[in-house]
Image (spheres, rainbow, N blue to C red):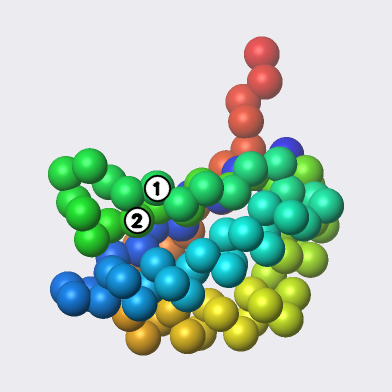
Amino acid sequence: MLKVIATTNVKEGCMEQYLAGVKELVEKSQAEEGNVMYTLNRVKDAPNKLIIMEIWKDQAAFEFHIQTPYFTTILPQLRAFTEPGEPAMFLTEVEF
C-alpha cells in the first residue's frame, strides 16, 4: 500500500471557498477503486492548516488518481486559495 500525507495552508479568509472546492475532490477520490482511505483533516492548533491523509492499494492506483480529469481540474483551482506549503509525504509501512 502507498500512504500519502498532503498538507495545505489555506489563505486567511479563503477557507469556505477551499472547502467548497475540495469536497468534490475528497468524494471522488474516496469512490475510486484503488482507494483504501482518503480524508480531509484540520490541525487543531492551526485552523487554516488542513491535511489530506490517503491510502492507495498500490502505486498504480495513486498514478491513476493523479491523472483523473477531476484531479487535474480541481487541484489547480484549489491553489488559488492556498499558500505555498510543504511537499507531500509518501509513506510505505514498515513490516516486522
Examine the rendered structure and indicate whether residue 78 appears above or below residue 62: below
Residue 41 shows which numbered tag?
1
Say which element carries label 2: strand
Few, some or many C-alpha atoms within 10 Å of disc 1 (few <14, some 14-19, many ≥20)? Answer: few
Q: Amino acid at mark 1?
A: Asn
Count numbered badges in the picture: 2
Q: Residue at x 67, y 20 (%)?
A: 95
Q: Position of residue 2 (x, y in %)?
A: 68, 44
Mark 1 element type: strand
Identified at 47% across, 85% down, the residue is: 77
Disc 1 vs disc 2: Cβ atoms closer than 8 Å? Answer: yes
- Residue 51 badge: none
Residue type at mark 2: give it. Leu
Residue located at (62% from left, 59% from top)? 27
- Which residue does the image show at 16% across and 44% down from the upper left? 45
Which numbered marker is on residue 50?
2
Badge 2 crowding class, 10 Å Cα cut-off, few under 14, some 14 to 19, many 20 or more, is: some
Q: Residue furthest top?
A: 96
* Viewer-nearest residue: 96 or 75: 75
Q: Is residue 27 left or right of residue 51?
A: right
- Whether residue 29 is visible to the viewer of this picture, yes or no, is yes
Task: Name the foreground residue: 18 vs 8.
Answer: 18
Q: CA distance from mark 1 to mark 2?
A: 5 Å
Instruction: Please determine whether, in this image, residue 51 is positioned above or below residue 11.
Output: above
